[in-house]
Every structure is written in structure tokens, then in C-alpha cells.
Amino acid sequence: MKELDVEVINRFARREGLSLGNAEKEYALSVALLHLSKFSEFRKMAFKGGTCLKKAYFPEFRFSSDLDFSSKTENAGLQSFLTRVFQNKTLEGVKFTKILKLERTKQNLSISLQYESQISGAGHVDSIRIESSRESEVMLPLQEKQILNPPEFELPPSFAYCLDLREILAEKIHAIYHRPKPRDLHDLDFLLAKGIAVDESLIEAKLKPIDKKLEFNSFKERMNVLGERWERDLRQVMQKTPDFQQIQGRVTKKLFNAEHGTLGGGTK
């Protein structure tokens, strides 16, 4: 699809139960990954997070709007790299405009990749948030995965170097302890249901930088915090919000020996 076909986006939105804006963003994400993959710098970026789960492993996964990476090198050159790839360029029908730095710390960089929406009306600008982090070391070999684009997008094949699913699972547990986003608990439940192994040493290493340990009482407390925001967060990324109590119960059973409150419920 060399030009963005609005009717294709409409059909895709109806089929997937997405808003038109999110359907367009799904296409923009696929185009961004396609053109990033053409550059050697992309091989130094380990794709991870929700969009990685959807675009590289499980196309049935929930909608995810950000591109998250672990970087093996300094983040200093990322903004100039993205500017070179995208700024003021029309790629596969997506009119990318500006690259804006949102936030920068010693270990993390957040960038907004802006594009002109062709769904929301003239002059409307949407964006993809790109997060690059050096906070957590990549511990398992990366997996080279083909990006799973919907066939109607008619995009050529592209590939990304992705975190191993066991490491993504461990990072989801880190996220549950570190930030108040209920979608992290949903994603953990999804991975456990797929039979992804629970690697206790990997989880321990991921939690060490924030001085946490995976244990029954603290994890239950974090789940309860997430439950307070469950509907509000998940309805942004899912057509039907799953039941919090059911997910809480499943995750607890798979991670812990519920009788003793110790690790031991899942696959090791």
C-alpha cells in the first residue's frame, strides 16, 4: 500500500474493534518499524514491551501504541538517527513531520515521532512515543523476528531484534512494581497463559535496580493498586475489559504457591 488507503484503515478498524485513530496508528507503527529496520543502527536497539508482543510474537495481543527499546549504546544519537529516518518524509503514505524530545534522563530517552493524521481531519497531528532505555541490561540472546503486519497493509517484510519472551515477562513484573499501569498485569497474565517460563533468577535481576523482590504480599499489594485503575486504563487499549478478579486469581496461582505465599505456582 504505497499510499494510505483510508478505506483499508476503515475495514481494519471494524475488524479489530479499534477506533479509526488507533487503526491508523497501527499502520503508522508498522511503517515506522519497516523503515527503522533498513538501518544498521536499528540492530543495536532491542525491541520490547506491548507493541513488540503484538508486532513480533502475538498478533492477537491488545492494541499498543508505543515503541519501546532497550539500547545497547548511549541514547545521545537516537534523536538525530530518528530525524534522519523520518523528519518531513512521507513513507508508505504516512506523512511524518517532527521528531520531538519529550524527556531525557541519564538512562532513558522519550521521543515523539509526529505524523499528520489522514483520518482525523486536516491539520490534525498524531504521534508515536518512542522510549529507549539503558536502565535494564539485556540478559538473554535477542530473537530476530519478522514483523507481523496485517495482510491488508501490503507492506514488505521487515525484521527486528526482540527481547526473549521470558525476559519480557520478567520486565512486566518489574513494571508492576515500578509504575501504576494496569495493562502490565493484563500482559503478564497473557504471557503466563501462553506458557512462557517464569525464570526466577531473571526476575530477581530485573527487580534489583529498584530494590524489590517478587514475594506474595508485596505483589498482592501492587495488584490491588492496579485494580483501582483497571477499567480506566484498559478500555484505552481493549474493546472489552477483562475481569480484574479473574486475572488477579490466575496470576497469583501461576506465580505463587498460594497456600504458603511463596514462589512456585508457575513453570520454572
Image (cartoon, rainbow, N blue to C red):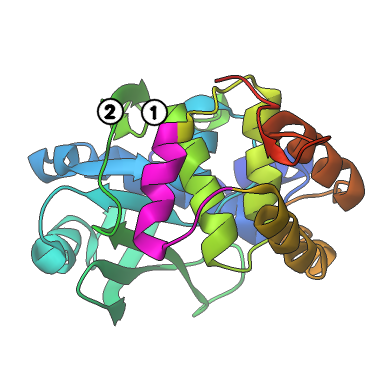
Residue drawn at 16 percent across, 37 percent down: 43
Residues drawn in magenta: 201-214
- Residue 246 versus residue 111 in the image, above or below: above
The secondary structure making up most of the magenta span is: helix
Name the amino acid type tagged 2: Leu
Reading the chain from its start, which is encountered first: label 2 or label 1? 2
- Residue 156 versus residue 173 in the image, above or below: above
Label 1 environment density (alpha carbons within 10 Å; few <14, some 14–19, many ≥20) = some
Left or right: residue 87 versus residue 268 is: left
Is residue 9 in sight in this rendering?
yes
Residue 212 lies, in percent from the top left, at: 48, 58
Pick the front one: 66 or 194: 194
Name the amino acid type tagged 1: Asp
Residue drawn at 41 percent across, 64 percent down: 210
Whether 180 is among the magenta residues is no
Residue 53 lies, in percent from the top left, at: 51, 36
- Residue 205 versus residue 116 in the image, above or below: above
The residue indicated by pointer 1 is 164
Left or right: residue 249 versus residue 121 is: right
Is residue 148 in sight in this rendering?
no
Contact? badges 2 and 1 (CB < 8 Å): yes
Label 2 environment density (alpha carbons within 10 Å; few <14, some 14–19, many ≥20) = some
The residue indicated by pointer 2 is 142
